[in-house]
Image: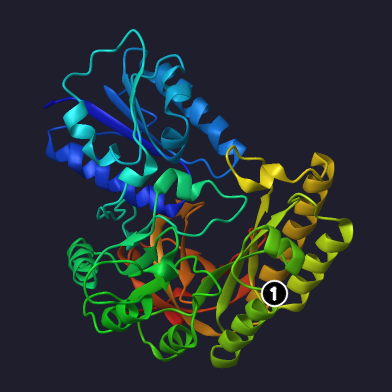
């Protein structure tokens, strides 16, 4: 395979990005040259998601795009969609190989040559065979890395296909995570975002001595050489007081949580098979804000779930409006095969789903603006990134406020102190006074 070119496109969550990066490194070690997905390549790997119906459509679009670049390219499809619908994907024109959850990290052994096939083949097995934790972290950004510490899920939410696509919950060891962190530090990253399918379930059901996400966070808080740890999405029932208190007292864990809610109506939460009620969710938010008033809190919410009435939706809307959260990730419910939610006959019309989604997205913008304005005039630490738009570079504060400053090459991948000035039309803070407002760490 020496001299063959490789391009990878990843759809979906940050966990997928960690795995796409890990597979890319594997193939580079075998002699492949990694190129941009927009270029013609000998091998294209499409790493799929299947959280929504739109993700499936995106997969097909990306396959067509790859074939437009090189009609003779060898096309491999991996990821969640590949586990759920391997035969269907193998029949898409131009697809050569489909690998399910248990085989995607064995891609190298399936590439005897890159000759296109007359028909696509698939190698898939029961999702229960995906029972081993595989290390992965993303290295496609100069400043930060997403580090997978947990995979799979033992929950059975009625709208979700992830357990069917990724299998049972499993985790890295604390020692394994620390070794990954050493590699990331050596690569020059300043920030690590801890990620997983059900991050708070870290350590559950693992053999040997019991350990938890709180145990992991305690060990990471002692690590030298990394400036920031950020916790990605964590379930409210697994976000314990000790975790919140650790973040509040830490110099490394930043004040930022992303906590799925899905609905502010307890009846719907029960139908969704969520493991908490709105009262627990509210308690977690109040606890965070009591210890860290400056903390950024993101929320996942689903609109249009079967049986959701207008009154139910307004209850969710008002619940979120009253909570001191910072932004929303709004998901319009879409039917997914083999989920319990398909059994519910009271389907919300698509037009109502879209209208409710739009209302919550407007609310999200208002929440974000209010959160930003609370910090106007403050000086906060910002990790500056390499992306440049109109002569300006961007970055995020510790509490996830987007900041834009004039570009200086020497400030890329530096954590600096920035005086938060005016909020620009693009929804981020602008600062132009470099000499007075920037102090490189």
Left or right of 139 in this view: 368: right
Where is residue 283 drawn, in percent x and y? 64, 84
- What residue does disc 1 label? 278
Q: Which of the pair 9/123 is nearer the observer?
A: 123
Work out whether 10 lies above or below 314.
Answer: above
Residue at 50%, 84% in the rendered image: 379
Q: How many marks?
A: 1
Label 1 element class = helix
Left or right of 106 in this view: 9: right
Work out whether 427 lies above or below 337.
Answer: below
Q: Residue furthest right?
A: 311
Where is residue 427 drawn, in percent x and y? 64, 62
Q: Is residue 163 visible?
A: yes
Residue at 18%, 25% in the rendered image: 4
> Residue 411 is drawn in which quadrant?
bottom left
Q: Residue furthest top?
A: 118
Pick the quarter of the image with the C terminus. bottom left
Pick the quarter of the image with the N terminus. top left
Where is residue 431 drawn, in percent x and y? 54, 71
Where is residue 341 drawn, in percent x and y? 67, 47
Work out whether 257 lies above or below 140.
Answer: below
Work out whether 27 lies above or below 409.
Answer: above
Q: Which of the pair 87/242 is nearer the observer?
A: 87
């Amino acid at each position: 395979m020496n001299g063959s070119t490789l391009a990878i496109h990843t759809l979906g969550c940050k966990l997928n990005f960690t795995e796409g990066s890990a597979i890319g490194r594997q193939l580079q070690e075998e002699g492949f040259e990694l190129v941009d997905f927009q270029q013609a390549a000998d091998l294209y790997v499409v790493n799929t998601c299947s959280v929504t119906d739109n993700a499936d459509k995106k997969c097909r679009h990306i396959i067509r795009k790859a074939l437009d670049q090189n009609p003779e390219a060898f096309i491999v499809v991996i990821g969640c969609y590949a586990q759920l619908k391997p035969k269907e994907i193998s029949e898409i024109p131009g697809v050569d190989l489909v690998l399910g959850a248990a085989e995607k990290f064995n891609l190298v052994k399936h590439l005897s040559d890159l000759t296109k096939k007359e028909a696509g083949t698939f190698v898939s097995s029961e999702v229960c065979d995906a029972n081993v934790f595989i290390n992965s972290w993303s290295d496609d950004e100069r400043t930060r890395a997403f580090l997978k510490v947990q995979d799979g899920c033992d929950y059975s939410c009625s709208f979700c296909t992830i357990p069917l696509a990724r299998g049972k919950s499993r985790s890295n060891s604390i020692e394994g995570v620390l070794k990954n962190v050493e590699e990331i530090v050596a690569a020059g990253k300043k920030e690590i975002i801890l990620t997983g399918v059900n991050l708070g379930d870290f350590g559950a059901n693992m053999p040997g001595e019991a350990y938890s996400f709180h145990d992991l966070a305690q060990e990471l808080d002692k690590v030298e050489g990394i400036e920031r740890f950020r916790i990605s999405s964590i379930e409210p029932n697994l976000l314990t007081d000790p975790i919140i208190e650790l973040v509040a007292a830490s110099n490394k864990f930043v004040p930022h949580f992303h906590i799925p809610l899905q609905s502010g109506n307890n009846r719907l939460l029960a139908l969704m098979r969520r493991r908490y009620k709105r009262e627990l969710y509210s308690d977690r938010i109040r606890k965070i804000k009591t210890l860290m008033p400056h903390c950024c809190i993101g929320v996942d919410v689903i609109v249009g779930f079967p049986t959701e009435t207008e009154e139910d939706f307004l209850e969710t809307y008002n619940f979120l409006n009253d909570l001191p959260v910072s932004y929303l990730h709004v998901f319009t419910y879409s039917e997914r095969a083999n989920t319990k939610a398909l059994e519910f006959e009271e389907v919300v019309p698509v037009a109502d789903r879209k209208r409710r989604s739009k209302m919550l997205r407007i609310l999200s913008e208002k929440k974000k603006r209010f959160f930003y304005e609370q910090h106007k005039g403050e000086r906060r630490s910002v990790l500056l990134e390499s992306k440049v738009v109109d002569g300006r570079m961007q970055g995020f504060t510790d509490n996830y406020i987007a900041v834009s400053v004039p570009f200086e090459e020497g400030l890329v991948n530096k954590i600096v102190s920035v005086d938060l000035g005016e909020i620009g039309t693009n929804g981020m803070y602008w600062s132009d006074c470099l000499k007075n407002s920037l102090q490189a760490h």
